[in-house]
Amino acid sequence: MNSLIFPLAGNEEFAKSIALKHNLLLANFQIRHFPDGETFIKIDSDIKGKDCIIICTLNEPDAKITPIILLAKALKRMGAAKVGLIAPYLAYMRQDIAFHKGEAVTSELFAELISSHFDWLETIDPHLHRWHALGDIYTIPSICLHANGQVAEYIKNNIKNPLLVGPDGESKQWVAEVASMAAAPYIVLTKERFGDNRVKVSIPNIEKYIGCTPVLIDDIISTARTMIEAVNHIKELGQSPVCIGIHAIFAGDAYQKLLNTSPLDIVTCNTISHITNKIDVSCIITVPE
Ligand code: R5P
């Protein structure tokens, strides 16, 4: 295959495993910041006529967006045939509606920005709630992969007698599928959000599952408020849950706060590098021809 891989800082391990699996070359290039914070780019690989793939997970996206757009533009200007973006975590999917008058629907604006600089996009479990597919907002070809199989495999191999628990209605899409793959029962809690950091989770009657190991599953752990509320409710039944998140954002001190609730374990996928990464999903990445 003729593609070259350009991992941005922090994405090297993920990129190496893709390169190995798909027999691709890692590009010889530099991208760093000048002392004043501007981006410096130098491309030493011969990229003329080649497909280039930038790998950059997009947690804390605002600091990453300028470098990846400048790199994509530089590659095009130097003769790359196509420039694709693999973003294991895709940012800006959660503001999918104007909740209040005057709010920008940034998921749509961000999609426009990415679509105008890349030829294709690939990601893992983007937060599709009011948007049903990436194609609703992205105008470039997009590939949407799912970590469900890897999560189910982890549960089957590591957790005895699991009861899968979705912390809110939105999580049902993941929990139901993982439960079916892991051949385990599941329930879904109800959640109300009162602001960025205030969440109330209610629990249905789960007494009939006493003796099971509760396994909370969500796509994103950001402030961890959703997980924390759910852990505290589940603990009232006398059993600490395992918390599984696909994307380990852990904003600010969210990880410490979740640890303070003493869950049985905290497990995430490696879409965002974090100490809790125990599920490797680099193996599900595909490389378009
Ligand atoms: C929201 O609908 C998502 O599925 C997650 O539940 C949410 O993003 C988690 O956010 P936080 O960790 O800030 O509660």
Image: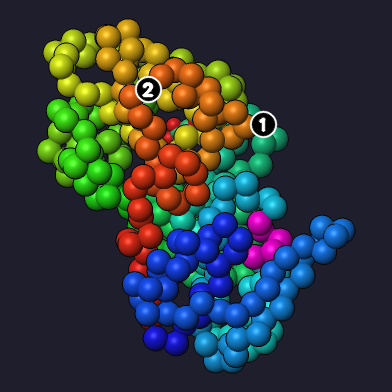
- Residue 107 position, x and y percent, is 57, 48
Identify which residue is drawn at 14% across, 28% down: 161
First-in-chain label (1 vs 2): 1
- Residue 79 position, x and y percent, is 63, 89
Look at the image and say whether residue 78 sits in the magenta stretch: no
| Kind of residue indicated by mark 2 | Pro
In the displayed structure image, the side of residue 103 where residue 157 appears, left or right: left
In the displayed structure image, the side of residue 239 where residue 43 appears, left or right: right
Color style of the picture: rainbow
Residue found at the very far front of the displayed protein: 275
Nearer mark to the viewer, of 1 and 2:
2
Q: Report which residue position mark 1 lands on.
A: 101
Q: Nearer the viewer, residue 165 or 31?
A: 31
Residue found at the very far right of the displayed protein: 36
* Residue range (magenta): 64-68
Q: Report which residue position mark 2 lands on.
A: 263
Q: Residue 154, located in which quarter of the rendered image?
A: top left
Mark 1 Cα shell of 10 Å, populated few (<14), some (14-19), many (≥20): few
Under tag 1, what secondary structure?
loop
Question: Height in image: 119 above or below 61?
Answer: below
Question: Height in image: 144 above or below 6?
Answer: above
Q: Is the distance from the Cβ of mark 2 to the nearest ligand 1 atom less than 8 Å?
A: no
Q: Quadrant of the C terminus?
A: bottom left
